[in-house]
Image: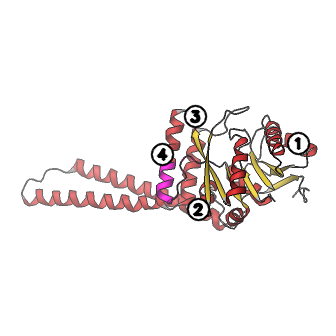
Amino acid sequence: MLSVILPAYNEQDNVAVAASEISRLLSSHGIDYELIFVNDGSTDRTWLRLTQLAASDKKIKAISLSRNFGKESAIFAGLENARGDALVVMDSDLQHPPEVIIEMYRLWQQNDVDIVETKKRTRGNEGRAYKLFAKLFYKIIDRVSGLEISDTSDFKLIGRRAADALLRMPERLTFFRAMSSWVGFKTECVYFDVAERKSGKSKFSFRSLFKYAFTSITSFTSAPMQLVTMAGVITFIIAIIFGINTLYNTFTGNSAEGFPTVILLQLITSAIIMFSLGIIGYYLSKIYEEIKQRPRYIISEKRNFDNEDKE
């Protein structure tokens, strides 16, 4: 059986269309399936639409989180409640083309692979700044993590063995795209063109994307901490150069008033110290969040599950 997991945040106009198109497609190819929509604390009528869909079709299952926990948590809520032998994660706005599911499913079924990644052939109508930011983000994460996730997305198929390995990872601060690559196993790749949203606008602003990128990098690698060490080395080298220059001028009698130099050095070192403290403080805050061992999400309601009563 194939489980299709669709996180949804304020997608009241898209969930019914997504359910209809995906159900029709999978049924026409004779694939046994379940659709699992995860309502990530939507403030519109998304949950009402999902309860109506679940009431009309037992293959459509719905989970409602108690508040907005974020897309990463919604993905893991779907993964942990899916029963399929293969699991597909995709957006509920249908920017991930449903027909690619069939291609991924056949690859998994016929080629004995555990994970089928997708890579974006084209990025749709994304702005130039967004594309440059995405390219920079992937370049950084590839370099610091040792993985190759450039142009990949959360749209992927994961076999049950790989999914179970992923769900055994205990961290609360998750980065699904990288974690699903980190677990390894045999992987294939397919390409797709980002489609137009069926309705509404993207919920990600540039600010939220920047926050998501920084959180993803820090949750998956300690590379930013190495910047602190690098900054210290650079400052040490500069200090040696200025120290040698000062001693030379003193012994040769050419020393002059060094007020601008002192101020410049103080500004440089102060900036590096504050920057370093900021990075260290951020990691300490993430450690604090992890050691509290709070759940990744809280479910308030379920539909069409065996235990669909309120949690």
How far apart are the alpha carbons under marks 1 and 4?
Answer: 40 Å
Q: Give the range drawn in magenta.
A: 138-153
Label 2 sits on what residue type?
Answer: Trp
**Callout 3: helix, strand or loop?**
loop
Q: Which residue is drawn at 84% across and 45% down?
A: 27
Q: Report if the CB atoms under discs 4 and 2 are less than 8 Å apart.
A: no
Which residue is disc 4 drawn over?
Answer: 136
Which comes sooner in the sequence, label 4 or label 3?
Answer: 3
Nearest to viewer (mark 4 / mark 2): 2
Bin the neighbour count of mark 3 within 10 Å (Cα to Cα): few under 14, some 14-19, many 20 and up: few
What mark, if any, has residue 53 been given in the picture? 1
How far apart are the alpha carbons under marks 4 and 3?
Answer: 15 Å
x and y, in percent, of residue 106 in the image: 72, 51
x and y, in percent, of residue 209 in the image: 58, 43
Label 3 sits on what residue type?
Answer: Glu
Q: Residue at x 81, y 56 (%)?
A: 1
Which residue is disc 3 drawn over?
Answer: 126
Which residue is disc 2 drawn over?
Answer: 182
